Image (tube, rainbow, N blue to C red):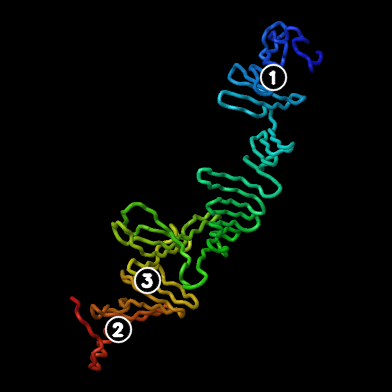
Amino acid sequence: MASLVGQQLKDTYDSLLKTSDNDALGAYKEITDGSGNGSSLYLGTGGNVGIGVSPIANLHIKDGSSSSDVRIQDSTGTTTLYLQAQNGLAVVGTLTNHDLRFDVNDNEKMRIDSSGNVGIGCSPSFSSGSGLEIERAGIATLRLQDTSTGKSTEITQGTNFEIDTVNTGMDIILDATTDTIFEIANSEIARINSTGLGIGVTPATTLDVASGNSGGDAGADAPVLRISNTTQGNDWDLDDAIGTIEIFAKDTSGNSPYSTAFIKSLNEQANGTLPSGSLSFGTAKYNASGGAVERMRIDQNGNIVIKNTEATPSTVTDSVHLFAQDVSSSSELKVRDEAGNTTTLSPHNFSLIPDGASEDMAWSYYSEKNGKKINVDMLKLARMVEELTGETLVYQINLD
């Protein structure tokens, strides 16, 4: 075919243009098949080309069906770029299993790979899963912004990984080599590192909580660890737990896990609309079935309640044992010293005295060590001294 440059199509190819107008660029002209039949290919003023439509752009395509397509292939036909306009939807992509790349100034700026991963400034590469990857020489930032409030969140990767809530003052800073830091108004609130969680302090143990002030009252701003019960009901029953600190043994060798100790706040007001607050302390024996049980309590009035022990405790160096034990169906308070002497402090043990208590208000002394026991009716002893001396040692009144 001869060159059409500088030529008028009608003059070069007779009946090629479907018009009697000899100026091919003076108006939109439809190219025919040479016999006057339309082809839906149009030439327009300024060099516009239309396929299926009179063009209003350099290339304008319109299909009479539901969608219009453009396909561009490489020389081998194995890679196909695809452009499509559907009813209510525009499509750009590839029809083959290849990446889609976006360039600016002849340099790649974004890529969607064949797996659907998105890379900005890079070809996305994920060791597992999929998603969005942003890469650049320097600090890489992803910003999410609410234009109605002016608030935004920036996710930044530089020397540290940071999540900054712009205009709110709340920040999270993750240092890959040291700590994860949580900030509010540019002031550190908490920190996580390989040691643990620190609130107000760099942690020295698994959980470390600190607060204070720079001067003045040393007790002001003391650290507080709070456990809040947000129950909305008003039906509190006796011994309902309000909050618990539990120490739990989770043995990975196969032994059944159980609670080894606890501190509980318990309600002591039966059928109340508000709870009272006693403090219960529990421990567990070796291989205890069911875990820790209550051993001692500070009740709502501040009284100390010591539960009965199952056996007399063994001697511990540099210490004494204070414990409760059942004696003749009555709980008695006892103390065991380092030398092994176990003495009953509550004066009601008359177990060695054949006739029992000499009077209804009698009190006794009871102690044992190394298989030996001693039991004295102290009120009877005082009465005998009164008889011998004529002195009054015991005074008694009736409270009825």
In front of the other: label 3 or label 1?
1
Q: Amino acid at mark 1?
A: Thr
Q: Given the current orientation, which residue lies at the most extreme right position?
A: 2
SS at badge 2: helix
In the displayed structure, 358 sits above or below 27; it is: below
> Which residue position is annotated with label 2?
378
Q: Which mark is residue 45?
A: 1
Q: Few, some or many C-alpha atoms within 10 Å of disc 2 (few <14, some 14-19, many ≥20)? A: some
Q: CA distance from mark 3 to mark 1?
A: 108 Å
State the separation of the CA atoms marked 3 and 2: 21 Å
| Nearest to N terminus: mark 3 or mark 2 | 3
Classify residue 56 as left or right of residue 382: right
Q: Secondary structure at mark 3?
A: strand
Whichever of labels 2 and 1 marks the residue nearer the N terminus, that label is: 1
Amino acid at dot 3: Ala
Q: Which residue is mark 3?
A: 324
Q: Position of residue 278 (x, y in %)?
A: 36, 64
